[in-house]
Amino acid sequence: MPSQSDAQRIAELESRLEFQDEAIAQLNDALVVQQQKFFELDKKLAMLVGRLQENNFELVDAQDEPPPPHY
């Protein structure tokens, strides 16, 4: 028969496990929301790049541009 301290330890472990399960569920929910936002932004970026390419707009690296005249 388990002693009182064993029963207390088991109760504490069960409590910790329940807390961890809840934390994992909350983190999973947050991750799902972040993934949805990422996919939305990825689609929008692809659309914007497509529009820029349709208009023959070239993406230029700032290092390739000459300095402004006041330098």
Image (cartoon, grey):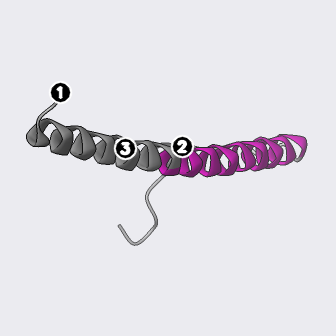
Q: Amino acid at mark 1?
A: Met
Magenta span contains residue 40: yes
Q: Which residue is mark 2?
A: 28
| 12 or 50: nearer the viewer | 12
Comes first in the chain, label 3 or label 2: 3
In x, y percent, where is residue 4?
Answer: 12, 42
Q: Quadrant of residue 5?
A: top left
On residue 1, the disc is 1
| Measured Cα–Cα span from mark 1 to mark 2 | 39 Å
* Residue at the extreme right of the image, as rendered: 54
**Residue 45 appears anywhere in the view:** yes
The kind of secondary structure element at disc 1 is loop
Q: Quadrant of residue 67?
A: bottom left
Name the side, left or right, on which 32 lies relative to 23.
Answer: right
| 34 or 53: nearer the viewer | 34
Label 1 vs label 2, nearer the camera: 1
Quadrant of the image containing the N terminus:
top left
In x, y percent, where is residue 24?
Answer: 45, 43
How many numbered marks, from 0 up?
3
Question: Which residues make up the magenta segment?
Answer: 26-54
Label 3 vs label 1, nearer the camera: 1
Comes first in the chain, label 3 or label 1: 1
Name the side, left or right, on which 22 lies relative to 5.
Answer: right
Label 3 vs label 2, nearer the camera: 3
Q: Which residue is mark 3?
A: 20
| 44 or 57: nearer the viewer | 44
